[in-house]
Image (cartoon, rainbow, N blue to C red):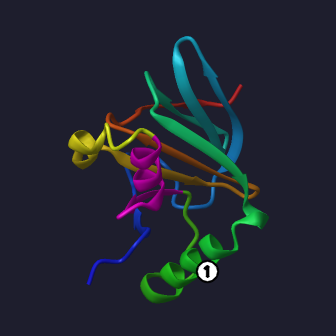
Amino acid sequence: MTVKNELVVWNPKSEIPLKLLELEKYEWNETGFSITLCADERLIRFSFNFVMSFQSTNEQMMLRFRDSYGELRDKKFSNYVWSLFKVKNSDYIKWFNEQHLNRYETIASNVEHYLFVTEDEILEVINDHPPTIHIEKKR
Protein backbone atom coordinates (compact mmCIF):
# COMPACT_ATOMS: atom_id res chain seq x y z
CA MET A 1 0.00 0.00 0.00
CA THR A 2 1.34 3.41 -1.00
CA VAL A 3 1.44 5.96 1.81
CA LYS A 4 0.73 9.53 0.75
CA ASN A 5 3.08 12.21 2.05
CA GLU A 6 5.30 9.67 3.75
CA LEU A 7 8.05 11.30 5.82
CA VAL A 8 11.48 9.78 5.24
CA VAL A 9 14.41 10.85 7.39
CA TRP A 10 17.03 12.63 5.32
CA ASN A 11 20.56 12.70 6.71
CA PRO A 12 22.71 14.13 3.92
CA LYS A 13 25.84 14.70 6.05
CA SER A 14 27.01 12.99 9.22
CA GLU A 15 28.20 16.34 10.65
CA ILE A 16 24.61 17.55 10.99
CA PRO A 17 23.54 17.06 14.63
CA LEU A 18 20.67 14.66 15.30
CA LYS A 19 18.34 17.25 16.78
CA LEU A 20 15.81 19.90 15.90
CA LEU A 21 17.66 22.74 14.18
CA GLU A 22 16.90 26.45 14.47
CA LEU A 23 16.05 28.56 11.46
CA GLU A 24 18.67 31.26 10.98
CA LYS A 25 17.28 32.58 7.68
CA TYR A 26 16.12 31.72 4.21
CA GLU A 27 16.54 33.80 1.12
CA TRP A 28 15.74 33.76 -2.54
CA ASN A 29 17.65 36.02 -4.90
CA GLU A 30 19.38 36.01 -8.29
CA THR A 31 21.88 33.35 -7.16
CA GLY A 32 19.20 30.87 -6.06
CA PHE A 33 17.41 29.80 -2.91
CA SER A 34 19.06 28.94 0.40
CA ILE A 35 18.03 27.85 3.87
CA THR A 36 20.41 28.39 6.76
CA LEU A 37 19.85 26.39 9.93
CA CYS A 38 21.77 26.69 13.19
CA ALA A 39 22.91 24.06 15.70
CA ASP A 40 25.66 23.95 18.31
CA GLU A 41 27.39 27.13 17.10
CA ARG A 42 27.36 25.86 13.52
CA LEU A 43 25.52 27.19 10.52
CA ILE A 44 24.26 24.66 8.01
CA ARG A 45 23.36 26.16 4.64
CA PHE A 46 21.36 24.29 2.02
CA SER A 47 21.75 26.04 -1.34
CA PHE A 48 19.68 25.39 -4.43
CA ASN A 49 20.89 27.04 -7.68
CA PHE A 50 17.34 26.94 -8.92
CA VAL A 51 14.19 25.92 -7.12
CA MET A 52 10.95 24.80 -8.75
CA SER A 53 8.79 25.81 -5.78
CA PHE A 54 9.03 26.48 -2.07
CA GLN A 55 6.68 27.35 0.74
CA SER A 56 7.01 28.37 4.35
CA THR A 57 4.35 27.71 6.95
CA ASN A 58 4.17 28.47 10.64
CA GLU A 59 4.51 25.12 12.44
CA GLN A 60 1.44 25.82 14.58
CA MET A 61 -0.75 25.89 11.47
CA MET A 62 0.30 22.44 10.27
CA LEU A 63 -1.78 20.15 12.46
CA ARG A 64 -1.85 17.25 10.00
CA PHE A 65 1.93 17.43 9.68
CA ARG A 66 2.32 17.42 13.46
CA ASP A 67 0.29 14.19 13.56
CA SER A 68 2.52 12.55 10.90
CA TYR A 69 5.69 13.77 12.62
CA GLY A 70 4.44 12.39 15.94
CA GLU A 71 3.57 9.04 14.37
CA LEU A 72 7.06 8.78 12.88
CA ARG A 73 8.58 9.56 16.26
CA ASP A 74 6.37 7.06 18.09
CA LYS A 75 6.84 4.22 15.59
CA LYS A 76 10.51 4.45 14.71
CA PHE A 77 12.42 6.41 17.32
CA SER A 78 12.27 7.12 21.02
CA ASN A 79 12.93 10.74 22.02
CA TYR A 80 12.93 11.54 18.32
CA VAL A 81 13.48 15.05 17.05
CA TRP A 82 14.86 15.79 13.62
CA SER A 83 14.71 18.61 11.09
CA LEU A 84 15.42 17.07 7.70
CA PHE A 85 13.08 14.93 5.64
CA LYS A 86 12.12 13.98 2.15
CA VAL A 87 8.47 13.34 1.38
CA LYS A 88 7.48 10.35 -0.73
CA ASN A 89 4.24 10.31 -2.76
CA SER A 90 3.98 14.04 -2.22
CA ASP A 91 0.76 15.97 -2.66
CA TYR A 92 2.89 19.10 -3.07
CA ILE A 93 4.62 17.66 -6.15
CA LYS A 94 1.27 16.49 -7.48
CA TRP A 95 -0.19 19.97 -6.93
CA PHE A 96 2.82 21.58 -8.66
CA ASN A 97 2.42 19.34 -11.72
CA GLU A 98 -1.31 20.10 -11.91
CA GLN A 99 -0.67 23.85 -11.71
CA HIS A 100 1.66 23.52 -14.69
CA LEU A 101 -0.76 21.39 -16.71
CA ASN A 102 1.33 18.29 -15.98
CA ARG A 103 4.18 19.75 -18.02
CA TYR A 104 6.69 18.43 -15.49
CA GLU A 105 5.17 14.97 -15.25
CA THR A 106 7.98 13.51 -17.35
CA ILE A 107 10.61 14.70 -14.86
CA ALA A 108 8.52 13.91 -11.79
CA SER A 109 10.64 10.86 -11.00
CA ASN A 110 13.64 13.19 -10.52
CA VAL A 111 11.79 15.77 -8.42
CA GLU A 112 12.27 15.59 -4.65
CA HIS A 113 10.16 17.15 -1.93
CA TYR A 114 12.50 18.39 0.82
CA LEU A 115 11.08 19.28 4.21
CA PHE A 116 12.95 21.39 6.78
CA VAL A 117 11.36 21.35 10.24
CA THR A 118 12.37 24.01 12.75
CA GLU A 119 10.94 25.13 16.07
CA ASP A 120 8.57 27.64 14.46
CA GLU A 121 8.64 27.14 10.69
CA ILE A 122 8.26 24.32 8.22
CA LEU A 123 9.97 25.02 4.90
CA GLU A 124 9.23 22.86 1.89
CA VAL A 125 11.16 22.80 -1.37
CA ILE A 126 10.56 20.81 -4.51
CA ASN A 127 13.37 20.56 -7.00
CA ASP A 128 14.97 18.19 -9.46
CA HIS A 129 18.51 18.73 -8.11
CA PRO A 130 19.66 18.26 -4.51
CA PRO A 131 21.05 21.23 -2.60
CA THR A 132 24.70 21.77 -1.91
CA ILE A 133 25.38 21.79 1.81
CA HIS A 134 27.92 23.98 3.60
CA ILE A 135 28.68 23.74 7.31
CA GLU A 136 30.64 26.45 9.07
CA LYS A 137 31.21 27.84 12.55
CA LYS A 138 28.84 30.59 13.64
CA ARG A 139 30.59 33.95 13.96
At x 48%, y 28%, the residue is: 47
Q: Position of residue 44 (x, y in %)?
A: 55, 37
Magenta stretch: give its range: 84-99
Residue at the spot of label 1: 67
Q: What residue type is labelled 1?
A: Asp
> Is residue 97 shown in magenta?
yes
Asked whether residue 15 appears in the rendered view, the answer is no
Give the quarter of the figure containing the N terminus: bottom left
Asked whether residue 111 appears in the rendered view, the answer is yes
Compare residues 14 and 113 and report the one nearer the observer. Answer: 113
At x 21%, y 41%, the residue is: 106
Residue 131 sits above or below residue 1 on the image:
above
> Is residue 14 shown in magenta?
no
Q: Where is residue 60 in the image (x, y as percent from the top left)?
A: 78, 66
Q: Which residue lies furthest to the top in this view?
A: 30
Q: Considering the numbered disc 1 on the image, is that residue within a helix, a strand or a loop?
A: helix
